[in-house]
Image (cartoon, grey):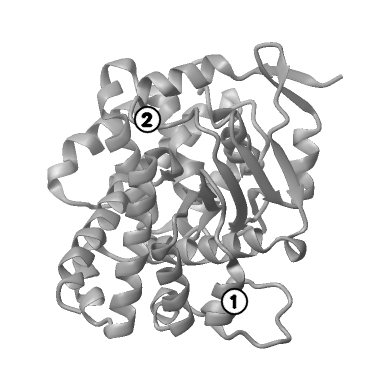
Amino acid sequence: MKIRIDVNEHRDALKSMNPHCDFDSNFIFYYDESNNPRKVHIENGVFNSPHNKNFILGGIVTKSTFPDFTNLSNRLKLQKTVNEVKFKHIAQGDFFSCLNSQKLNTFLKFFLDEDISIHFYSVNILYFGLVDIIESIIPDEHINYHFLLKNILYKLVKIDVDSVIPILRKYAYPNIKKDKFSDFSKEFLDIVLTRKIDPQFNYIVDIIKSSLTKSAKMQTLQFITNEKDHTLIDNFFHFYQDRITTFINSNHTFDHELKIEEKFNEIEFLDGKNILSNYTFLDSPNEVKIQVSDVICGIIGKLYEFVNNIDIDNLFNSLENFNTLQKENIVSLFQLIQKSENKNPAFIHIFQSLDDITIIRNIHEWTKTVDNNI
C-alpha cells in the first residue's frame, strides 16, 4: 500500500515564509542532474563520491512556450554525429576551462535573449552530510546562531577532511550508537580543538566545544542516530519531491532515474483529496529540453565546484586572471542566474555554507564591474 502525504501543511508554511516567491503559477519545468552519486556513504575509508562537488538538479523553466532549440543547435555548430546534446559537447574541464568555450558563450547568450529561465537545486554534499551534527547537539538558546555554527563546523572539517573520515567511519556516522555518544563527541571535539580559524569566530568555536562536551551526556543525538550506518545521504529523492510538491500547479519533466522513480511509485502526494500527477520521466535522447537542462546543470556544477575549492583570500586574483572570453561567459552566467531569480526567487535553491554563499555573492558583484569594461 502506498504512503499518502498531504503536501499543503509544508507548502503553506513555505509560502508564508517566502511571500515574495511564486509557488502557484503554472510553470513548465524540465530537469536533468549533475554530479549525482545516488547516495553518499563511506566505503574503504573514503567517500564514494568527491566531497568537493555539488549535486545539481535543475534545468529550464518557462510560463509560456519554449523557444525553437533548432536555432540554438545551428548556432552551436555541433558535429552531425551528436544525436544527444550533453554538457561535454559545449564545454569540458574545470570551471576555468569551461569558461573558455565559445560554444558556452553562444549557449548562454541564447538564453539571455529568450523569455526563458533556469532553475536549480545546488547541494554541497559534505555540508549537507555534516550539518545534522549541529542540529543534534546545539541547545535552544543558541538557535539564532545555527547557520553560523554550521558554517564554522564545516569550515573546521574542510581544513582536513581526510582526517575526519576515520572518525565518521569508526562510529558508523550518522548512526551513532547510544553507548558511543561520549566517545564520538570527544574525538570530534579533538578536531575542533586542534584547528585554527579567524579569531573573530572563537566564540562560535567555543559554543561548538561546549555543545560537543554536553552531547557526551545526552540520551539521544536526534539526527545522527537511528540512521543507516556510514550513509551520509541515502538518496536525493527529497529534492525531486520538493519540486513537485511545492509547485503543485506546474508540470515537471525529469530525465529517467530508476531509483527516484521507484520512490515516487511508493508514495501518493495529495493536494487535499486530489492525487498529484504533475510529473513525468522521459528519456533524454528523445527530449531536447532535458538535453539543454543537462548543459545548465553542467555549468552550474562547475561553478560550485570552483566555489568549494577556492579560498576567499585568493578569489579576486583568480578572477582577474580570466581572459576576455572567460569574463564574458561568467558575466553571462550570472546575468542568467539573476534574470531567473528576478522572475521567481523560488527557482534557485542553494544548500551551501555561509562562507561559500559569500564567495558567490562576491563573484556576482565582481561580474557587475567587469561587465562595464568588457
The outermost residue toward the top is: 273
Determine the residue positioned at 17% across, 51% down: 198
Q: Secondary structure at mark 2?
A: helix
Q: Which residue is tagged 2?
A: 212
Circles 2 and 1: CB atoms closer than 8 Å: no
Q: Which residue is tagged 1?
A: 73
Neighbor class of circle 1 (other Cα within 10 Å; few <14, some 14-19, many 20+) is few
Whole-percent x and y of residue 251? 63, 39
Near-viewer residue (363 or 253): 253
Q: Amino acid at mark 1?
A: Ser
Determine the residue positioned at 48% across, 43% down: 128
The quadrant holding residue 159 is bottom left
Whole-percent x and y of residue 337? 37, 55
Q: Is residue 243 above or below residue 225?
A: below
Determine the residue positioned at 20% across, 76% down: 317
Near-viewer residue (76 or 258): 76
The quadrant holding residue 207 is top left
Name the front one of labels 2 and 1: 1
